[in-house]
Image (cartoon, rainbow, N blue to C red):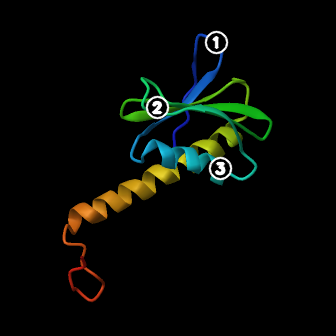
Amino acid sequence: MLTLIDHRTADGSRHFARLVTVAPWERVRQHVRRLENAELINSVDPPGPRAWLDFSYRGHRFLVHEQGRHVDLLVRNPLCCDLILYQVGSHFLRLSSVANRNRRDNEDDPGQTSPGGRETH
Protein backbone atom coordinates (compact mmCIF):
# COMPACT_ATOMS: atom_id res chain seq x y z
CA MET A 1 0.00 0.00 0.00
CA LEU A 2 1.23 3.46 -0.88
CA THR A 3 1.49 6.10 1.83
CA LEU A 4 1.87 9.66 0.58
CA ILE A 5 4.31 11.92 2.38
CA ASP A 6 4.59 15.71 2.26
CA HIS A 7 8.19 16.79 2.49
CA ARG A 8 9.15 20.05 0.76
CA THR A 9 12.56 20.21 -0.84
CA ALA A 10 14.82 23.27 -1.05
CA ASP A 11 13.44 24.14 -4.51
CA GLY A 12 9.82 23.93 -3.27
CA SER A 13 8.99 20.57 -4.85
CA ARG A 14 7.04 18.00 -2.87
CA HIS A 15 8.72 14.68 -2.08
CA PHE A 16 5.62 12.46 -1.92
CA ALA A 17 6.83 8.85 -1.91
CA ARG A 18 9.87 6.67 -1.26
CA LEU A 19 9.91 3.14 -2.71
CA VAL A 20 12.40 0.32 -2.37
CA THR A 21 14.45 -0.15 -5.55
CA VAL A 22 13.87 -3.68 -6.78
CA ALA A 23 14.09 -3.32 -10.55
CA PRO A 24 16.99 -2.36 -12.78
CA TRP A 25 16.99 1.34 -13.67
CA GLU A 26 16.15 0.63 -17.34
CA ARG A 27 12.92 -1.09 -16.21
CA VAL A 28 12.05 1.97 -14.11
CA ARG A 29 12.62 4.14 -17.18
CA GLN A 30 10.41 1.88 -19.34
CA HIS A 31 7.76 1.94 -16.62
CA VAL A 32 7.37 5.72 -17.03
CA ARG A 33 6.31 5.08 -20.62
CA ARG A 34 3.62 2.65 -19.43
CA LEU A 35 1.89 5.37 -17.40
CA GLU A 36 -0.90 6.44 -19.74
CA ASN A 37 -0.38 9.98 -21.08
CA ALA A 38 2.97 10.40 -19.33
CA GLU A 39 5.76 11.98 -21.36
CA LEU A 40 9.41 11.38 -20.55
CA ILE A 41 11.18 14.75 -20.69
CA ASN A 42 14.73 14.04 -19.60
CA SER A 43 16.83 11.48 -17.79
CA VAL A 44 20.25 10.80 -16.37
CA ASP A 45 20.99 7.09 -16.41
CA PRO A 46 23.57 5.10 -14.46
CA PRO A 47 26.47 4.73 -14.15
CA GLY A 48 26.43 8.05 -12.40
CA PRO A 49 26.23 8.95 -8.78
CA ARG A 50 22.51 9.64 -9.11
CA ALA A 51 20.06 8.53 -11.74
CA TRP A 52 16.83 10.43 -12.31
CA LEU A 53 13.89 10.70 -14.69
CA ASP A 54 11.91 13.84 -15.39
CA PHE A 55 8.42 13.38 -16.88
CA SER A 56 5.08 15.12 -17.20
CA TYR A 57 1.73 13.62 -16.29
CA ARG A 58 -1.69 15.30 -16.24
CA GLY A 59 -0.17 18.77 -16.46
CA HIS A 60 2.42 18.28 -13.71
CA ARG A 61 6.18 17.71 -13.75
CA PHE A 62 7.50 14.71 -11.83
CA LEU A 63 10.94 13.48 -10.89
CA VAL A 64 11.96 9.91 -10.11
CA HIS A 65 15.28 10.01 -8.30
CA GLU A 66 17.36 6.94 -7.47
CA GLN A 67 18.96 7.11 -4.02
CA GLY A 68 20.89 3.93 -3.38
CA ARG A 69 18.40 1.20 -2.48
CA HIS A 70 15.29 3.31 -2.97
CA VAL A 71 13.71 5.78 -5.36
CA ASP A 72 12.16 9.08 -4.38
CA LEU A 73 9.14 10.45 -6.22
CA LEU A 74 8.77 14.22 -6.37
CA VAL A 75 6.35 16.64 -8.00
CA ARG A 76 7.39 20.18 -8.98
CA ASN A 77 4.08 21.75 -7.89
CA PRO A 78 3.56 20.99 -4.18
CA LEU A 79 -0.17 21.73 -4.58
CA CYS A 80 -0.69 18.86 -7.04
CA CYS A 81 -3.74 16.95 -5.82
CA ASP A 82 -3.21 13.76 -3.85
CA LEU A 83 -5.23 11.73 -6.37
CA ILE A 84 -2.65 12.38 -9.10
CA LEU A 85 0.20 11.70 -6.66
CA TYR A 86 -1.45 8.45 -5.67
CA GLN A 87 -1.83 7.43 -9.34
CA VAL A 88 1.86 8.06 -10.05
CA GLY A 89 3.04 6.48 -6.79
CA SER A 90 0.84 3.41 -7.24
CA HIS A 91 2.10 2.99 -10.79
CA PHE A 92 5.70 2.74 -9.56
CA LEU A 93 4.71 0.66 -6.53
CA ARG A 94 3.29 -1.97 -8.93
CA LEU A 95 6.73 -2.23 -10.56
CA SER A 96 8.25 -2.79 -7.12
CA SER A 97 5.59 -5.33 -6.18
CA VAL A 98 5.98 -7.38 -9.38
CA ALA A 99 9.77 -7.44 -9.11
CA ASN A 100 9.56 -8.34 -5.41
CA ARG A 101 7.10 -11.17 -6.12
CA ASN A 102 9.29 -12.55 -8.92
CA ARG A 103 12.37 -12.42 -6.70
CA ARG A 104 10.54 -14.18 -3.84
CA ASP A 105 9.28 -16.87 -6.22
CA ASN A 106 12.82 -17.51 -7.43
CA GLU A 107 14.15 -17.64 -3.86
CA ASP A 108 11.39 -20.06 -2.82
CA ASP A 109 12.07 -22.32 -5.80
CA PRO A 110 15.72 -22.05 -6.82
CA GLY A 111 15.36 -25.03 -9.19
CA GLN A 112 12.61 -23.19 -11.11
CA THR A 113 10.23 -26.14 -11.21
CA SER A 114 7.46 -26.23 -13.76
CA PRO A 115 3.78 -26.59 -12.77
CA GLY A 116 4.10 -30.35 -13.29
CA GLY A 117 6.88 -30.48 -10.70
CA ARG A 118 9.71 -31.03 -13.17
CA GLU A 119 12.82 -28.94 -12.88
CA THR A 120 13.38 -26.53 -15.77
CA HIS A 121 16.76 -25.55 -17.20
Where residue 62 sits: x, y (%)?
66, 32
Which residue is found at the position 31% from the left and 58% from the top?
103
Near-viewer residue (17 or 65) = 65
Q: In this view, does 32 lie above or below 80?
A: below
| Outermost bottom residue | 116
Q: In this view, does 55 lie above or below 38?
A: above
What amino acid is labelled 1 in the image?
Asp
Q: Is residue 94 above or below residue 79?
A: below
Neighbourhood count class around disc 3 (C-alpha, 10 Å): few under 14, some 14–19, many 20 upward: few
Numbered circles on residues, count: 3
Q: Earlier in the sequence, mark 2 or mark 1?
A: 1
In which quarter of the view is residue 12 placed?
top right
Cα distance, mark 2 to mark 1?
Answer: 18 Å
Can you tell which mark lies on residue 11?
Answer: 1
Cα distance, mark 1 to mark 3?
Answer: 26 Å
What amino acid is labelled 2 in the image?
Glu
Where residue 78 sits: x, y (%)?
69, 23
Can you tell which mark lies on residue 66?
Answer: 2
What amino acid is labelled 3 in the image?
Arg
Cα distance, mark 2 to mark 3?
Answer: 17 Å
Where residue 44 sits: x, y (%)?
55, 30
